[in-house]
Image: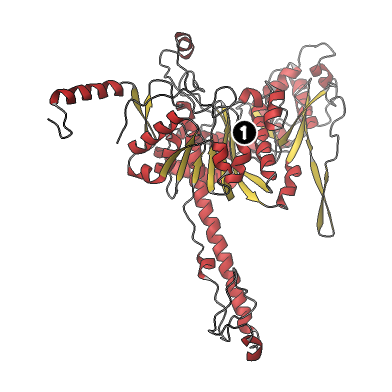
Amino acid sequence: MGGDGKTGEEEKQSSQTMASDLNDYAIIKEGEAEIIMQAKNEVFYNKTQVNNRDISIAVLRTFISKRKQEHESMLSRRTRTAQKVSIENTSEPEAPIDSVVDNEKPNGECEESEEISHDEPCSISKGPVKTPDWKIRGELKPPRVLEALSASGLRALRYAREIEGIGQVVALDNDKASVEACRRNIKFNGSVACSKVESHLDDARVYMLTHPKEFDAVDLDPYGSPSVFLDSAVQSVVDGGMLMCTATDMAVLCGGNGEVCYSKYGSYPLKGKYCHEMALRILLACIESHANRYKRYIVPVLSVQMDFYVRVFVRIYTSASAMKNTPLKLSYVYQCNGCDSFHLQSIGRTVSKNNSIRYLPGYGPVVPQECRDCGKKYNMGGPIWSAAIHDQEWVTSMLADVKSMEDRYPAYDRISAVLTTVSEELPDAPLFLSLHNLCATLKCTSPSAVIFRSAVINAGYRISGTHVNPLGLKSDAPMDVIWDIMRCWVKIHPVKVQPPEQAGSVILAKEPVLQANFARAVASLSKAQAKKVARFLPNPERHWGPKLRAGRQITSKHSSLLGPHAVPSTNNHEEGDDPQAKRKKVEDPISIS
């Protein structure tokens, strides 16, 4: 008989039952974390999001490092200020005793107050005023992280186990089965996970609203649109904290349903080749709008479009005066119906006078009713975020960190390629051109990217690639310069005569003002290209994309679409448009102690 009173036969049956139950589970290892997943599609796990999780870990590591540097810098400034005040006080003539006694208490102590003034002595002592220790030391606590939509808890577990210096990680989900799975996985990952990660059954929106300014980093990774979470998310982040946000509803953000995008994000998308970058900028503008309602504003440190989603990392600050600059960071986009010409219209502008700044509406319109290049009408979209979407200093730090810890990133090749390309993007050139689209408009053969880039550089402008599209080119050259370069190219490589009403015919009918120089420029190749560093990698396997929502099963129909090796996979969240829709409750067949 066993120690728990079971007979040998009962123990044998129990172990057989456990083995049978375990056949319905699989252990999945990613990074240093392991999770137990059911074969049934009950709790979401998406293998594809390994890129997302890896790049989030890289950002958090850099955030912790920058946060520590900023704190030390602040303490250094405070110390210098205190020393300066002390020197000024000791150099002042000694005050008469009669004038000081009135400020004393009988025991010679100062009156209690929240802050001691450095301008007045608090006793008859001739020594310098001492700054309170708490003001000089100012302990920096480990950052608290909230994963608002946790599902299996894999992301929270990886944060806790892989990021040095991280504090408490709170994993939320509105589904009972997901919370049970998350708690099971926390226990499965041992003492480190148990001490740092906690799981709660709660609505993320309510939880964030009831915990304002409590988290140093908030992670939103819903199945679909994050718009319903943004209002509460921007309130739950501490001043200077990080908000990490994913949007997977790319059909909406890229112009498939413009009216739906406007209802969710407050911006109208356009169907240009740059639509994925526009999706990034729409999401940033939406987050800024929600932050502004609480006298807060955002500073993007990294914004990427990867696989089937966009992911932005922004820091959130509180300042009523800095918030006034928001209209300067937003623009409407005019996209020509006939050619690839696009123009940005800033929402606001400033005028300086007598050391004061006035905020005024932007000048407009920036375009006439008909396109100057081809004579067609414009579509108008936006507003979008037209300021920088990356902090190049952060990107450089992240790239160095990733390369120094290659073995700790399962998706190292992909995220290092993305960060390398991002590091070479022009920061002040919103959206981009497609060289193939320009040539399709003119019905001409395409110059190589090096030749085209050389022509732009030789004309005195800057040009770079973009991480969004391997054929995309960012440039500060105006559209009339771009078309002049293409006109000069067509003169060297003539095209067949086209109907005169076509956009390409109208463009080519004009003589170029600028005479393009196609001689190869030194800077026509980026540093990554010159060093033959990979920038755009193919997907690691077929059908690399979003998996089925939680509660769905792969049928024979799905199997035929996904291939013979497809694994059932789920997301933690929504049915329809609600990322926290509750699903069917299921009993957990095993528990792990």
Direction from residue 286 to residue 343 in the image, left or right: right
From where the camera sits, is residue 272 visible? no
Q: Residue furthest front?
A: 5
Name the residue nearer the viewer: 272 or 165: 165
Q: How is the image coloured?
A: secondary structure
Q: Provide residue 297's location: percent of width, then percent of height.
A: 67, 46
Q: Secondary structure at mark 1?
A: helix
* Relative vertical location of residue 310 with respect to residue 118 in this rendering, above or below: above
Residue at image coords 16%, 32%:
5
Residue 186 lies in quadrant = top left
Q: Provide residue 344's location: percent of width, then percent of height.
A: 77, 34
Q: Residue furthest right?
A: 369
Instruction: Report the quarter where the C terminus lies.
Output: top left
Instruction: Report the quarter where the N terminus lies.
Output: top left
Name the residue nearer the viewer: 289 or 497: 289
Mark 1 Cα within 10 Å, few/some/many (few <14, many 20+)? some
Residue at image coords 76%, 15%:
495
- Which amino acid, by three-letter code, is at mark 1? Val
The residue to which callout 1 is attached is: 228
Name the residue nearer the viewer: 454 or 240: 240
